[in-house]
Amino acid sequence: MPLTESPSQPNTRSVQSDPPRLQIKQRELGRFRDTQSGPTLVVIGGVHGNEPAGLIAGQRVLDHLQSVDAHAFQGQFVLLAGNMSALNDHDPDSRYIDHDLNRLCLDAHFAEPSTTSAEHQEMHELFSVLESIQHAASNADQEMIVLDLHTTSSNSRPVVVFEDSLAARSHAMRMPCPKYLGIEEEIDGLVIDAVTNRLGCVSYLVEGGQHEDPRSIDVHEAAIWIALDSAGIYPIAQSPGDPGAVIRKAAMDREGVVYDVRHREPILDESFTICNDIFNGTHAIAEKTVLAIQSGQPVHSPITGLIFLPNMQTHKRIGDDGFFIVRRISPGWVNLSARLRRKHWVHRMILLMPGVYQGESSTLLVDADLACVLRRQVFHLLGYRLVRHDGREGGTGVVRFFKGIGAFCKAIVRGPIRGQYGDGPDPSDPRFWIVARRRLDQPI
Ligand SMILES: [Zn+2]
């Protein structure tokens, strides 16, 4: 058995609630396949060193699969360790060694050598393994899907997070817990983002609950069974117990709820502390509510919404996420978005709008005054992602309406723009935001 548990390190928390420390000796911890071909589900656990629950759950699934009818299993299940250095670190709170692996996976860092840091080596090794699995899958004309399992420092319920493409929706929406869209626009370098945009694979992330809560392992195991079913590899009816019921119960039957991530607050000082009366989000917070204290000063919520993933880690590090603010989206928006983004004429219409220009490859350059007003109501709705933006908001209500009208009029009066490369502005022109249709939504 590849996973071995070592005694918990002595610390101030109760022995009963400590997650077991794992000794990870190899990146690939197990693989189950049948004799027929089929899709591949790759599960990654421990991208953060203090989050071993996904690996324990993955090992449970592998153990169970040893005793099932292999003919019902059509495809492949692979379990990979994320940040081996941090998982094997003697400090039980070690989330990472030098850099957060779940913020590092950017093209610029992939261009740097493995020797740059502990996490550069982890990233290169992890993606090398993923690429070889994907290569084998695509040679067999099969799909690879990646599920990244995490837990949280705060007491929380399970949620699923994904880049909002139609392909990812078809898998992630099957998880019977709240869905979170748009986190990739607030933070760079997510593992799932690199899997989707470098490898072209559906990838999604499940937060299973609090690090120390043993129910997080149950949730992750249930998530793997559901993911195997969604991928068409192993039917849920053959899974042990009722995985859907496990997640529904842990999520308090909130599976139809969808949120949009609107704001990320970075930690600027290691003294950052979430206020005692602030919990991972079920109650709305008003604009300017004090959510944390940092360097002796209050940290306010810049907008109304719900707090998501408040940082309760023992060790805070500068640049880590302090908290996110999210807002609820209606199911009608989700359904309308799915219908519209499949229509080719809709995407051609966008290019006819004043202030919108064709950029390099699949990108559009959009006048910033217009883009900030339309970012959610048009671009997110139709499956476009902000690639470069200046973070400004378009306002609300009447202000937003008149800002939009003003931006349209300005673009019409200004007329066509010719940049150094011909029609349309230069991509480096800061007056324009760059947006791109989500890779998995793009026509092949
Ligand atoms: Zn994590």
Image (cartoon, rainbow, N blue to C red):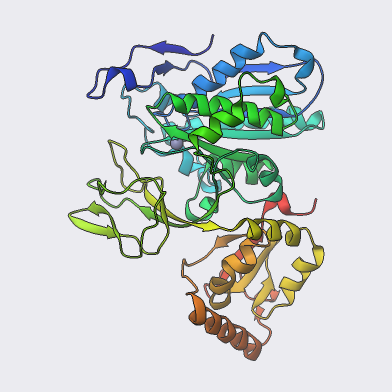
12 sits left or right of 96 in the view: left
Give the vertical position of 385 relative to 84 (above or below). below
Give the vertical position of 114 relative to 5 (above or below). below
Observer-nearest of 429 and 249:
249
Give the vertical position of 314 relative to 19 (above or below). below
Q: Is residue 104 visible?
A: yes
List x then y, in percent, for residue 151.
Answer: 44, 33
Residue at horizontal 74%, vertical 26%? 233
- Ligand 1 quadrant? top left
Residue at horizontal 75%, vertical 66%? 347
Number of marks:
0
Which residue of the protein is positioned furthest toward the bottom in this rendering? 413
Residue at horizontal 63%, vertical 26%? 225
List x then y, in percent, for residue 232.
Answer: 75, 30
Give the vertical position of 255 relative to 33 (above or below). below
263 sits left or right of 316 in the view: right
Q: Can residue 223 be seen in this view?
A: no
Observer-nearest of 330 and 321:
330
Classify the position of the N terminus by image quarter: top right
Residue at horizontal 50%, vertical 77%? 397
Observer-nearest of 51 and 327:
327
Which residue of the protein is positioned furthest toward the left in this rendering? 296
Q: Answer with the quarter of the image where residue 382 lies.
A: bottom right
List x then y, in percent, for residue 330.
Answer: 59, 58
Q: Answer with the quarter of the image where residue 63 lies.
A: top right
367 sits left or right of 358 in the view: left
Observer-nearest of 416 and 287:
287
Q: Answer with the quarter of the image where residue 117 lies.
A: top left
